């Protein structure tokens, strides 16, 4: 099985995230999507507790979209993938990233281990892919036709509620997770 590994802070999850999940499945790029919210990183100081983000992501869960609540304690992507390989030894892992990650991808820790897997790169605007991908073999699957939504979790936290699922919005309000929602 082809398992898409969609790692992110999801702080909070929004319709842009959901569109990525649906696209991967509809285009048959993967058979299942595993959503994996990250722990609280040193460079992100405004993350709500990972368990709250897991609960919000569960509103997107369905047969082929799974929320992972086990592999959330690893600070580096290679560690997540290493652990997932042990738990899903028969599956092909496909790391899912946006093209905005390409500029600094070469700085990711243990990049060679990450590239033992395929990496699906979804276009996010004016990123010149060849500039970043020419140094890598064919581990990248670059998707040009993904029509992303111009929204971020920061926008949502700052009060732009246009691209957030009503169930997630209600959960945020009931648990008083963000000041402006």
Image (cartoon, grey):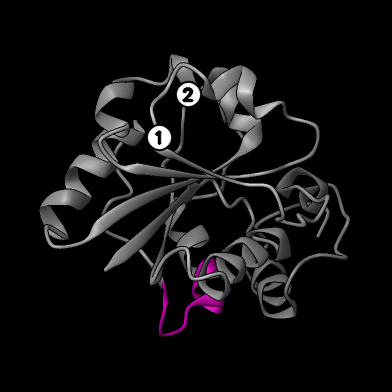
> What residue is shown with label 2?
42
Q: Which residues are magenta?
A: 57-65
Q: Is residue 15 left or right of residue 6?
A: right
Give the quadrant of the N terminus. bottom left
Instruction: Judge by depth and name the residue closer to the eye, 27 or 102.
Output: 27
Question: In the image, residue 61 lies at what x, y percent?
Answer: 48, 78
Magenta-drawn stretch contains 62: yes
> What residue is shown with label 1?
138
Secondary element at image label 1: loop
Question: In the image, residue 164 lies at what x, y percent?
Answer: 76, 67
Q: Is residue 160 left or right of residue 104?
A: right
Question: In the image, residue 22 lies at what x, y percent?
Answer: 59, 71
Question: In the image, residue 81 lies at what x, y percent?
Answer: 26, 43
- The answer to which quarter of the image holds residue 70 is bottom left
Q: Residue at x 81, y 65 (%)?
A: 163
Q: Residue at x 83, y 53 (%)?
A: 180
């Amino acid at each position: 099985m082809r398992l898409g590994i969609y790692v992110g802070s999801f702080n909070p999850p929004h319709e842009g995230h959901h569109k990525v999940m649906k696209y991967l499945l509809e285009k048959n790029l993967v058979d299942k999507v595993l959503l994996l919210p990250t722990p609280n990183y040193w460079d992100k100081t405004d993350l709500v507790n990972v368990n709250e983000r897991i609960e919000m992501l569960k509103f997107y869960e369905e047969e082929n979209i799974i929320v992972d609540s086990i592999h959330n304690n690893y600070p580096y992507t290679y560690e997540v993938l290493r652990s997932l390989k042990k738990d899903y030894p028969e599956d092909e892992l496909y790391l899912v990233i946006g093209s905005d990650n390409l500029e600094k991808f070469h700085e990711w820790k243990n990049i060679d281990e990450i590239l033992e897997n395929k990496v699906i790169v979804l276009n996010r605007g004016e990123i010149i892919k060849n500039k970043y991908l020419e140094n890598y073999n064919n581990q990248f699957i670059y998707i040009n036709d993904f029509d992303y939504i111009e929204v971020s979790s920061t926008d949502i936290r700052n009060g732009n509620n246009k691209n957030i699922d009503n169930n997630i919005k209600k959960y945020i309000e009931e648990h008083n997770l963000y000041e402006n929602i």
